[in-house]
Image: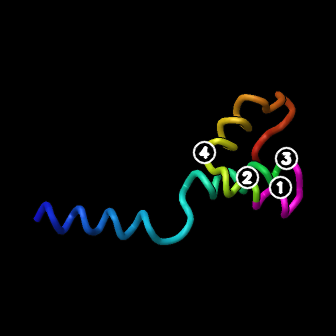
Amino acid sequence: MLLADVHVVETVTRSGIGLGSAIAVVCSWQRNRSIIFAAVAGIFGWFYVLYFALTRQPDEELK
């Protein structure tokens, strides 16, 4: 049973984009409205999410 659980987790993490990349793309698009910046943010993933959280201005709201 344990071996089957490990296989499922590995399969899920290998397919598609990660959560960090998806959040980074949305945050970048919200701030910059640029496909190129959104793609670069998607590559950096969680690093961009942390950057966005630390540099966000009070008037920037995620809608």
Pick whichever of labels 1 and 3 is earlier in the sequence: 3
- Please state the extent of the stretch shown in magenta in the rendering: 32-39
Which residue position is annotated with label 3? 31
Left or right of 25 on screen, residue 20: left
User: Which quarter of the rendered picture does the N terminus lie within?
Assistant: bottom left
Residue 27's disc is none
Distance of mark 1 from mark 3, alpha carbons? Answer: 10 Å
- Mark 2–mark 1 CB contact (< 8 Å): yes
- Which three-letter amino acid code belongs to the residue tagged 4? Trp
Q: Earlier in the sequence, mark 2 or mark 3?
A: 3
31 relative to 53, above or below:
below
The residue tagged with tag 3: helix, strand or loop? helix
- From mark 1 to mark 4, how far is it between C-alphas? 15 Å
Q: Residue at x 79, y 32 (%)?
A: 56
Q: Which residue is found at the position 60% from the left and 45% from the top?
A: 46
Label 4: few (<14), some (14–19) or many (≥20) C-alpha neighbours in 10 Å: some
Residue wearing tag 4: 46
- Magenta stretch mostly in which secondary structure? helix
Q: Name the residue under label 2.
A: 41
Residue of label 1: 37
Q: Where is residue 52 in the image (x, y as percent from the top left)?
A: 74, 38
Does residue 16 belong to the magenta stretch? no
Along the line of sight, which residue is nearer the eye, 59 or 43? 43
Kind of residue indicated by mark 3: Arg
Q: What residue type is labelled 2?
A: Ala
Give percent across and percent down for residue 24: 68, 51
Measured in 3D between alpha carbons, the distance from the residue under mark 4 to the one under mark 3, in whole angstroms, is 16 Å
Residue 36 sits above or below residue 52 on the image? below
Nearer-N-terminus badge (4/3):
3
In the shown orientation, is residue 22 left or right of residue 18? right
The Cα atoms of the two marked residues, 2 and 3, are separated by: 11 Å
Q: Which of marks 2 and 4 is nearer the N terminus?
A: 2
